[in-house]
Image: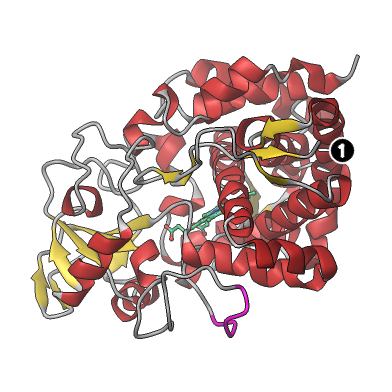
Amino acid sequence: MSEYDVLEADRLKQLFDLTGEAYVTRGGGFAEDPYPAFHKLRESGPVHEGVVGPLVGFDDPRAFFQGLPYHDLPHYSAFDWATCDAVFRDGDTFISQPPDADENALMFGGILYMDGERHRRYRALVQPQFLPKNASWWTDQWTVPAIEALLDRMAPNGRADLNVEFFSAIPLLTITGSFGISVADALDIREVAVSDGNGLERFFAIVKPLIAARKDDPRDDLISLLLRAELTEADGTTSRLTDDEVLTFSFLLLTAGGGTTWKQMGITMLGLLWNPEWLDAVQQDRTLYRSVVEESVRWTPTDPMFSRFVAHDTTLGGVDIPGGSVMHMCLAAANRDPARWDRPDEFDPGRPLQAQMGFGGGVHTCLGMHVARAEIVNAISMLLDRFPNLRLDEDAPAPRITGMYERGPSTVPVRFD
Ligand code: HEM
């Protein structure tokens, strides 16, 4: 018996199938390739009135993501690199705090939804733990043990859908492990995270007792770090986070950490399987993994859109935008802007390295990006080390990249027998 036995295939499939029920409100089943439409929109102007999804053919009123739904507000979307970059850099005009932040304090109280000095002070509390020099704090304790257990489990079968059987659990167990949450409770945390704000009682039932326990008995984990962190006010006085603030911070980290990287792992793996010369190349030279991951996030970022609320009337890309609007940045389109990249639609890890936007930009740039990179490199390199003859399973239905506001592979079917 191993603690990983609780990760039942059916439950993983239910929680991590983009085309299934759990991802309906994020448009997981949207099957079109949106990139031709992104190019067309960009060619006719950097900024368009409307929301990214409806502008490219996905129009579901239930859509739920950062900046959505807000049906009563005007919406605008930007599709080129320069405009998205300008929005990220202007935190006075394009703010992160939603108009209904107070009503939904748990979901909207975290740093993703803060602005200015308040954002800086709260982010600084946890930032050090997420720096590249601390990547092994995460990978040695939680990522690598999970990878090894999952590889052992797959090995006798000779074939697998890596999406569900391998990638899904690795980032989830890394972030839940870093909170001291058991493998048995990890899937419940994931279920709350995909429920658009429902089922929070289960989240409280898992995290509140941990907060209480760590107050008496601190450990080397994120809850203990949040509990001992000191906020410094402008006048130099310091204070600790309240229990509600610790809960809110935990909710954001657990949701963001467990929900993104698994899809980017699958996208990276498909990039390699569809370009076998790169699959060979990384097997010969491990130093290439870093460029492969960076190119995967440029080519197809798993979260293709992030948004801001417009603080006052402004003009962007020649379009007048009233204060109170929602401004969506299509990072996926910016990442394939031909003004910045040659052959932007090609997955080419050999291209000259330059900043891409898949982890966002400006002061809200993804806090977890170094952890995410380390998780992806460990997962794929350990997979290919264990199964050097890994190849696409030609008997399985052909995988494709699916989804609108969350994108990733439909499946990653492979053989290694
Ligand atoms: C490939 C995987 C990931 C991608 C593509 C990704 C993408 C992003 C993007 C685009 C943003 C900026 C949002 C904005 O500007 O409004 C962001 C923010 C954030 N991400 Fe990630 N993320 C990934 C993995 C992770 C992981 C593993 C964690 C945690 C362990 C994490 C935690 C966060 C947090 C806390 C923020 C908010 C930062 C702030 O507001 O200052 N992310 N992420």
Q: Nearer the viewer, residue 284 or 266?
A: 284
In the picture, the quarter occupied by the C terminus is top right
Residue at (39%, 56%) from the top-left corner?
304
Q: Which residue is the site of mark 1?
A: 148
* Residue 98, x across and y down, in percent: 30, 49
Residue at (55%, 60%) from the top-left corner?
366
In the picture, the quarter occupied by the N terminus is top right
The answer to which image quadrant residue 82 occupies is bottom left
* Residue 313, x across and y down, in percent: 12, 70
Question: As drawn, which residue projects farthest toward the right?
Answer: 1
Q: Quadrant of ligand 1?
A: bottom right
* Residue 341, x across and y down, in percent: 43, 82
Residue 28 seen in this snapshot = yes
Is residue 142 a member of the stretch shown in magenta?
A: no
Q: Is residue 374 left or right of residue 65?
A: right
For residue 74, above or below residue 292:
above
Q: Which region of the structure is painted magenta?
A: 349-354
